[in-house]
Amino acid sequence: MSEFFAMGGYAKYVWSSFGVTAIVLILNLLAARRQLRQTRERLQLRLVRQSGRKVNT
């Protein structure tokens, strides 16, 4: 099992690349969720302004 984690002497590079990839994917997910929330808020404000009434969330 330790041979697997050692990756033939390249463990530092392999595991760091996995870590960087995981961080990038998580940041991408968080950015997409934030953008979706902001878009929904903007559209809700637009609906309120156009209709002149409050829209429930």
Image: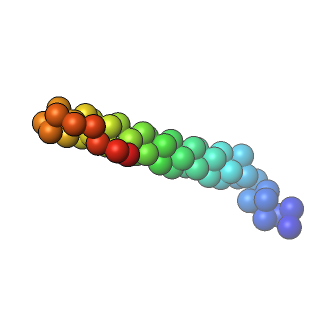
Q: Position of residue 43 (x, y in %)?
A: 24, 40
Q: Residue furthest bottom?
A: 1
Q: Looking at the image, which is closer to me, 18 or 23? A: 23
In the image, residue 41 above or below residue 16: above
Q: Looking at the image, which is closer to me, 18 or 27? A: 27
| 4 sits to left or right of 29 | right
Q: Looking at the image, which is closer to me, 17 or 52? A: 52
Total numbered labels placed on residues in the image: 0
Q: Looking at the image, which is closer to me, 13 or 23? A: 23
Please give the name of the residue rendered at 83% of the width and 64% of the height, measured from the top-left corner. 3
Q: Position of residue 28 (x, y in %)?
A: 45, 45
Please give the name of the residue rendered at 38% of the width and 41% of the height, measured from the top-left corner. 37
Regarding residue 31, the answer to whether it shows in the image is yes
Please give the name of the residue rendered at 79% of the width and 57% of the height, measured from the top-left corner. 6
Q: Position of residue 26 (x, y in %)?
A: 54, 47
- Colour setting: rainbow
Q: Quadrant of the N terminus?
A: bottom right
| 23 sits to left or right of 53 | right
Regarding residue 17, the answer to whether it shows in the image is no
Please give the name of the residue rendered at 86% of the width and 62% of the height, measured from the top-left corner. 2
| 8 sits to left or right of 56 | right
Q: Residue furthest left?
A: 50
Q: Position of residue 29 (x, y in %)?
A: 47, 48
Q: Residue furthest right?
A: 2
